[in-house]
Amino acid sequence: MLELLAPAGSAEAVSAAVQNGADAVYLGYGDFHARRNAKNFSDEEFAAAVSYCHLRGVKVYLTLNTLLSDRELEGAAAQAAAAATLGVDAVLVQDLGVLRMLRHVAPSLPAHASTQMTVHSLDGVKQAADLGLTRVVLARELSREALEYICLHAPIEIEVFAHGALCMCYSGQCFFSSVLGTRSGSRGLCAQPCRLKYGWGKRADSYPLSPKDLSLISYLQELRKMGVSCVKLEGRMKRSEYVAVVTGIYARALREEREPNAEELQALHDAFSRDGFTQGYYLDQKGPDMFGTRAENTPEPKELFAAARRTYTDTENPLVPVRLYAMIRPDEPARVAAEDDLGHVATAEGPVPEAAQNVPLTAEAVQAQLSRTGGTPYRAEKLRCLVEPGLSLPLSALNALRRSALDGLSAQRTRPPARETNPYQAGVRYPTRKEPPELTISLRRASQVTPELLDLRPAILYLPLDELAAHPEKALRTPHTAIGVTLPRILWDRELPDVLEKLAVVRERGVRDALLGSLQHLGTLRDMGFTLRGDFGLGVYNAQTLKELKHLGFTSATLSFELKFPQIRDLTKAIDTELVVYGRLPLMITENCIIKNYHGHCNCDNENTLTDQKGMHFPVLPAPGCRNEIFNSQTLFLADKAEDYRHLGLWGARLFFTTESPHACVQVTQRYLNQARWSPGAYTRGLYYRNVE
């Protein structure tokens, strides 16, 4: 059976989801989940929600799917241990450091890879399985063919988003909100700058970054057949009535194995949409038709929401089938038993029946009393009564026996499993590196590699795989500079054969260092003998992540540019660390080519720039696979702040070149080596001096 997973941003939303047929709900409490602006559960409310759901046969998944600092990990560990003790069925995670913490604090608590982990290939799923995860929530950008291929070979469960808001950027790779406004999407406080107006000229007059909401309601049977384990509904920031409407429609479609009717489709649209819905990614039909906005002052569908509210406030929907048994025999206490589909059995004993003076008790009369389970989560699926003739027992006694047996069954259903929990321990600290960091350089184009740049002797120079394979002469190592290959952050299974061929080419040319922005093809690169170096896409935010990367075989890792300098200084560094100290910071990587959407054809060779409502210009550059990367309007510049980052224990200070000319690359590098006085006209200090929420 395909599991239906519904959002629960409040206690009322829990009821709305459960009473409308959800098989599981996902919710967060505290400050460690990806919708921190949703109404938080208190400890008592969270415990009550778990009990409420488990009583009704519904699973509960806790979201711990944000990047956490070292100081936050202890609080998250206490929360995870409490959740494990309460019987939460699984935890969703993004941060490798959080996953490492969970293994120690609650080793038997299942963990799922959040979509924030950016898993989008079979190798990524296998890597998640190797990390001990039991389920992966795949990227929303994947097509049905990509999903089917992964499901066919996946060693663990696959979860797919089926309804709700689409992010423009691959989840877990968006820095737009944090770089522009210090509210980090990877830390649960995205300000949704993608929903604002942008333009391609001087005016911001359209919405090129605002996708319509996703809806796969017509493809549920197809998803079931391909082997998807769970379909997920988005909406923890939505009101409870919305949750009730959407969950109910999806639950009925799944239960009755049918497509939605016209009335249900209209209800989904009325509950919430942005100019309708899209299936563009699923059907592999990307383009401008996937985009839309929510009209201002859209009226609330009062009648629809009022009807939805009644589904979870007026009555209890009897969701749990039970079998009830009764035995009425002379000279023995009357007995009633209740059994559920999980094998729980609860029994109750009552008074000894008396000899009937007038009308004797019958099996039919006993069944009638036992079947009256209204007001409880139970429905009597089967009744078996042994009633010997000539006996009498008050109906009130039978009612009390039924209530007692069902109460006993409820106690068993809500009893948390016995789970081991351990106190959190940060573990060993590593000596701080005393030497100033080496200069490292990443480029986008082979033409940016010049003899003048190599004469400046950076420790390592990274080039994209496509560029290195097309220009193998650039792979030649110098006595002072190693050449490394940058892997695409996004790499679908259908793109892998071409990538493997190119990797073999650069490997043959002597390239040994590989810079990875995801874990998708870690095993392949390791088997090919590359030295593994982590890029910013891995989201390294705490020391536990560095320890996990060391365990996976990484030699170095690039720290998140959402960290402040004091946090970086205090990190114990299990492996060498790099930090981006110059360049246009990446804001988004998109599956939908907004350049092609605007021009109507490929136009990547020309300059493409988005303009926001403040007149700021954001370069849009091509990424492998006909994708786009959007970069910040201002350049990060820290050459005059070198003393601030030289004492942070870093191995590498990275110059991140994107749109710069070959001459500019040399100029900037000279400035960072104190060989020139160049500085950009306008620049930013990034997030290193600001508090990121």
Image (cartoon, rainbow, N blue to C red):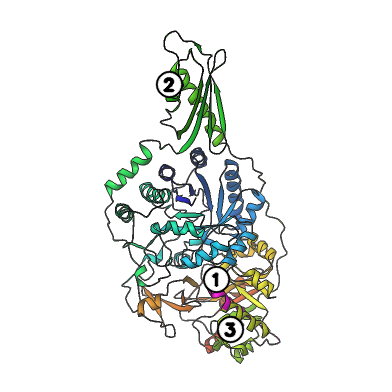
On the image, which quarter does residue 519 sit in?
A: bottom right
Residue farthest front in this picture: 389
Q: Are marks 3 and 2 in contact (CB under 8 Å)?
A: no
Q: What residue is pinned by disc 1?
A: 493
Kindly identify the amino acid type of the residue bearing the numbered disc 1: Asp
Tell me which label, 3 or 2, sits earlier in the chain.
Answer: 2
Query: Does residue 689 appear in this view?
Result: no
Q: Residue at x 52, y 67 (%)?
A: 687
On screen, residue 370 above or below 13: above
Looking at the picture, tell me which residue is in the foreground, 688 or 610.
610
Nearest to the eye among marks 3 and 1: give it: 1
Q: Label 3, on which residue?
A: 669
Please state if 379 lies on the left or on the right of 114 as rendered: left
88 up-or-down from 296: above or below: above
Q: Secondary structure at mark 3?
A: helix
Asked if the magenta segment contains residue 251, the reply would be: no
Q: Amino acid at mark 3?
A: Thr
The residue wearing badge 2 is: 365
Q: Is residue 665 left or right of residue 374?
A: right
* Magenta highlight range: 477-497
For the point 49% across and 41% down, which residue is it?
A: 53
Q: Image quadrant of residue 87?
A: top right
